[in-house]
Image (cartoon, rainbow, N blue to C red):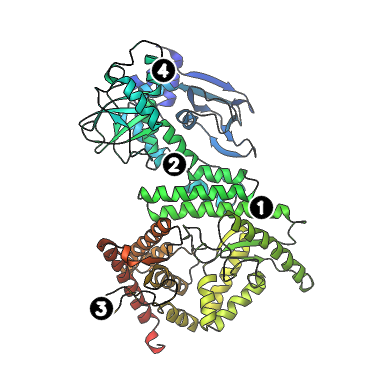
């Protein structure tokens, strides 16, 4: 036997997916593997190059994958690691450069071998599908919180459901080639499915017309059955992008037929093409985040945020879990804000006089802003001398004005209540912010409680994170010193009881612009938000301000009340999804709902959410003994 092939076999058999192949399959691959020796700093491929018909495995040493613009290391591949497979499946130019960061030996495996032995092995293929996202490793160097979070959750592309054409063009097998070509031309499509009793039996593409008709090999008057490719490859409606990519590579095709049960024996419901996958990729969250970093103007960022709206719609249609959608959109929003701050800093005449942090507050701070609504933000800067305070604050007010303007251009309207960092009230030093929060806590009148419900939900976005930690610590210290504050916050949390009247009817707005409409935010969502905030503050725990995260932590801390908190989580998820869908449908914030548009199922679903509101409010009234205050 080939001694080199045996040595390669002894190495690869220890690493998946090669360890999942039979000995005969793996030996067949090993006999055709090419071995590359790279000295340190040698390139295997560089950004922009056309992809080679192969992917790679590191035998010895280490290969770094570098981003061209910043020359930053985004992935390090060690012994047994695979790289270049995504590019091979993407069929596009290399997006990164592969460079030896130490003396290395690399094996290259052709796409033909991949198709013949790996995609046809169910265990190996399933491994690739399940690990396609998680096996991308990122080096956490001096990157921001946003960048780290993006790497964790945004590389979701291959696992999401593929967005395919729901109305595929089709014809019978007796249709003439000429008639089929005319249909394709009129419908402006590059393929047509041949069906029998609505079931797919074949396909014709532009390529078939070029190679079989334009060459004169077959008469255009013959039936489509003379040139159609068959049998077709079929998949069910929930096919993922990764499955589609692997299937197309495995069968060397560019189209997949989508049927009711994924077999050719049921009705054709869609068509997925290689072009569709490219479109999905161009409107993928991870792609948008990378594009954000390359933009040089607020208008470019506006275009990206509009594309994010399309992602939101697609994820809702695909029934992606709402908590995942919120993380995706929040990461995009944070990335946009980060870049706006960086662009604004470049426009300032000097560097910042001291360190600062940009904070998202309210729904933005809780990572619950899915739709484009108005801005809510604040700025905290490090303490400076009394003499320098005014000039320092003015610098950050000028910076904030640029940032707020940039966010407005992108699509986030200016806050009508002026809850923005460009307002001197909300652009303060760390000491002044501590005094402000202490004052609100010490004097919990209605106005101060309202401000607490907004500003307590702040989240670090950009700058010096240590300032945010100091601020959080001071808030808990102030609450400990004024325990009665929690009772007042509890009263505030009960101001909106379950939104049903004595006769079990929805409580609607009595007058004004939204008369007879249901306020899903104030009457259903905010009671759950307020309750979660109060209960987690009473525990003295500083965790992410997200409402669902708060209830999850409460369920962990109080298993005896776990059923209540789990019901609150379910209710909040349903309300958030419902409001988002309404907002997209009516092109507004989704806050006010016309009850006449609800069917019986919608009404029942909403009413079931109100039960959770009542249960958690009853718990609050008992725990904080609020009957003495009411």
Of callouts 3 and 4, which one flags the residue occurring earlier in the amino acid sequence? 4
Is residue 22 at least partly visible in the picture? Answer: no
Check contact, mark 3 vs mark 2: CB within 8 A.
no
In the picture, measured across the screen, residue 185 lies left or right of residue 376, that is left
User: From what the image shows, is residue 22 above or below residue 363?
Assistant: above
Whether pointer 1 and pointer 4 mark residues with C-beta atoms closer than 8 Å, the reply is no
Of circles 2 and 4, the one toward us is 4
Circle 2 sits on which residue? Answer: 157
The percent coordinates of residue 100 (x first, y second) are 60, 29
Regarding residue 303, the answer to whether it shows in the image is yes
Residue 91's spot in the image, x, y percent?
48, 28
Which disc is residue 342 wearing?
Answer: 1
Image quarter (top left, top right, bottom left or bottom right) of the C terminus: bottom left
Residue designated by label 3: 503
Please give the name of the residue rendered at 47% of the width and 38% of the height, measured from the top-left corner: 281
Report x, y in % for residue 197.
Answer: 20, 31
Which one is closest to the eye, mark 3 or mark 2?
A: 3
Tell me where residue 456 appears, x and y as whole percent: 53, 70
Q: Is residue 80 left or right of residue 142?
A: left
Say which mark, if any, is on residue 542.
none
């Amino acid at each position: 036997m080939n001694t080199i092939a045996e040595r390669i076999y002894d190495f690869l058999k220890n690493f998946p997916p090669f360890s999942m192949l039979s000995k005969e399959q793996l030996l067949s691959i090993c006999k055709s593997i090419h071995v590359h020796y790279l000295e340190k700093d040698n390139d295997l491929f560089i950004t922009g190059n056309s992809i080679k018909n192969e992917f790679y495995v590191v035998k010895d040493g280490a290969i770094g994958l570098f981003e061209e613009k910043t020359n930053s290391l985004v992935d390090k591949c060690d012994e047994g690691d695979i790289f270049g497979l995504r590019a091979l499946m993407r069929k596009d130019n290399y997006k990164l450069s592969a460079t030896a960061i130490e003396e290395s030996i690399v094996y290259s495996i052709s796409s033909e071998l991949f198709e013949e032995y790996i995609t046809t092995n169910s265990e190996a293929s399933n491994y690739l599908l399940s690990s396609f996202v998680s096996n991308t490793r990122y080096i956490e160097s001096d990157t921001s919180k946003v960048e780290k979070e993006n790497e964790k959750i945004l590389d979701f592309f291959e696992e999401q459901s593929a967005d395919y054409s729901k109305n595929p063009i089709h014809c019978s097998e007796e249709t003439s080639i000429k008639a089929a070509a005319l249909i394709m031309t009129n419908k402006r499509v590059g393929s047509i499915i041949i069906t029998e009793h609505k079931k797919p039996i074949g396909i014709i593409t532009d390529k078939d017309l070029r190679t079989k008709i334009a060459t004169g090999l077959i008469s255009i008057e013959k039936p489509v059955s003379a040139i159609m490719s068959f049998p077709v490859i079929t998949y069910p409606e929930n096919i993922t992008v990764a499955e589609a990519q692997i299937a197309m590579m495995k069968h060397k095709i560019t189209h997949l037929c989508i049927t009711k049960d994924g077999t050719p024996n049921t009705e054709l419901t869609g068509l997925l093409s290689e072009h569709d996958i490219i479109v999905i990729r161009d409107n993928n969250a991870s792609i948008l985040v990378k594009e954000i970093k390359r933009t040089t103007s607020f208008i470019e960022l506006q275009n990206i945020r509009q594309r994010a709206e399309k992602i939101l719609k697609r994820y809702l249609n695909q029934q992606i879990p709402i908590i995942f959608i919120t993380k995706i959109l929040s990461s995009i929003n944070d990335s946009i804000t980060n870049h706006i701050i960086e662009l604004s800093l470049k426009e300032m005449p000097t560097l910042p006089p001291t360190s600062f942090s940009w904070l998202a507050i309210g729904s933005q701070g809780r990572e619950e802003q899915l739709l484009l609504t108005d801005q809510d933000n604040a700025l905290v800067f490090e303490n400076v001398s009394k003499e320098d305070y005014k000039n320092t604050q003015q610098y950050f007010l000028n910076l904030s004005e640029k940032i707020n303007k940039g966010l407005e251009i992108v699509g986030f309207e200016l806050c009508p209540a002026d809850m923005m960092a460009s307002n001197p009230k909300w652009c303060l030093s760390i000491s002044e912010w501590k005094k402000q929060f202490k004052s609100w806590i010490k004097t919990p009148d209605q106005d101060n409680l309202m401000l607490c419900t907004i500003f307590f939900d702040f989240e670090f976005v950009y700058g010096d994170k240590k300032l945010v930690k100091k601020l959080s610590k001071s808030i808990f210290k102030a609450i400990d010193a004024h325990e009665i504050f929690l009772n007042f916050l509890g009263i505030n949390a009960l101001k909106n009881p379950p939104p049903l009247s004595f006769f079990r009817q929805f409580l609607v707005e009595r007058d004004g612009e939204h008369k007879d409409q249901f306020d899903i935010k104030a009457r259903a969502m905010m009671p759950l938000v307020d309750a979660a905030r109060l209960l987690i503050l009473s525990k003295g725990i500083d965790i992410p301000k997200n409402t669902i995260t708060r209830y999850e932590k409460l369920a962990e801390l109080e298993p005896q009340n776990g059923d209540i908190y789990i019901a609150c989580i379910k209710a909040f998820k349903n309300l958030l999804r419902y409001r988002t869908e309404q907002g997209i449908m009516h092109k507004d914030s989704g806050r006010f709902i016309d009850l006449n548009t609800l069917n019986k199922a919608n009404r029942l679903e909403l009413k079931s959410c109100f039960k959770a509101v009542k249960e958690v409010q009853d718990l609050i009234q008992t725990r904080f003994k609020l009957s003495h205050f009411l």
